[in-house]
């Protein structure tokens, strides 16, 4: 999808760095940093470009790509026993709430 510029291992490493260290840059990414461009009123689209030592990614496109990848993965893996076992314990919608915590609003828990 990204012509080799953004591989799964790089995404995972970036996720770990961002969540566990609160940083957006690390030379171990293969880039000094990954730049996520937010949607703008200018309607400009800059995506999947290597700029000096950084990778630029359009945030909206990246999110859509991740969702597409998850759906594709789910189609492939949905028949496996591991997938079925884990999904049985995954988040569920509790329509109208989850007493005694929250009542009157849908809750995912």
Image: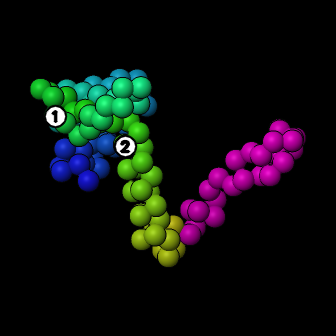
Expressed as whole percent of the image width and height from the top left, the position of residue 102 reads 83, 38
Q: Residues within 10 Å of mark 2 (few under 14, many from 20)?
A: some
Q: Which residue is mark 2?
A: 61
Determine which of the numbered discs, if any, sits on residue 97 in the image.
Answer: none
Residue farthest to the left?
52
Q: Is residue 105 magenta?
A: yes
Expressed as whole percent of the image width and height from the top left, the position of residue 40 reads 40, 27
Residue farthest to the bottom?
79
Give the image quarter of residue 62: top left
Disc 1 versus disc 2: nearer the observer: 2
Residue farthest to the front?
42
Question: Would you say 94 lies left or right of 20 here?
Answer: right
The answer to whether residue 51 is visible is yes
Picture layout, residue 70 above or below residue 12? below
The answer to whether residue 21 is visible is no
Range of residues picked out in magenta:
84-109
The image shows a total of numbered marks equal to 2
- Helix, strand or loop under label 2: helix
Picture layout, residue 66 above or below residue 25? below
Q: Is residue 11 magenta?
A: no
- Tell which of 75 and 79 is nearer to you: 75
Expressed as whole percent of the image width and height from the top left, the position of residue 19 reads 43, 31
Expressed as whole percent of the image width and height from the top left, the position of residue 21 reads 39, 25
Question: Would you say 102 lies left or right of 8 here?
Answer: right
* Pointer 1 with pointer 2, Cβ within 8 A: no
**Which of disc 2 and disc 1 is earlier in sequence?**
1
Question: Would you say 101 lies left or right of 51 here?
Answer: right
Disc 1 to disc 2, how far (Cα)? 16 Å
Q: Which residue is mark 1?
A: 50
- Tell which of 94 and 43 is nearer to you: 43
Residue at 41 percent across and 63 percent down: it is 73
- Tell which of 7 and 81 is nearer to you: 7
């Amino acid at each position: 999808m990204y012509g080799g510029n953004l591989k799964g291992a790089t995404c995972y490493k970036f996720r770990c760095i961002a969540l566990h260290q609160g940083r957006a840059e690390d030379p171990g990414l293969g880039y000094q940093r990954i730049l996520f461009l937010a949607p703008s009123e200018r309607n400009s689209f800059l995506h999947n470009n290597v700029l000096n030592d950084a990778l630029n990614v359009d945030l909206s496109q990246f999110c859509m790509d991740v969702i597409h990848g998850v759906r594709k993965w789910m189609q492939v893996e949905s028949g496996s026993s591991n997938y079925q076992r884990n999904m049985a314990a995954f988040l569920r919608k509790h329509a109208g709430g989850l007493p005694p915590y929250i009542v009157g609003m849908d809750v995912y828990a």
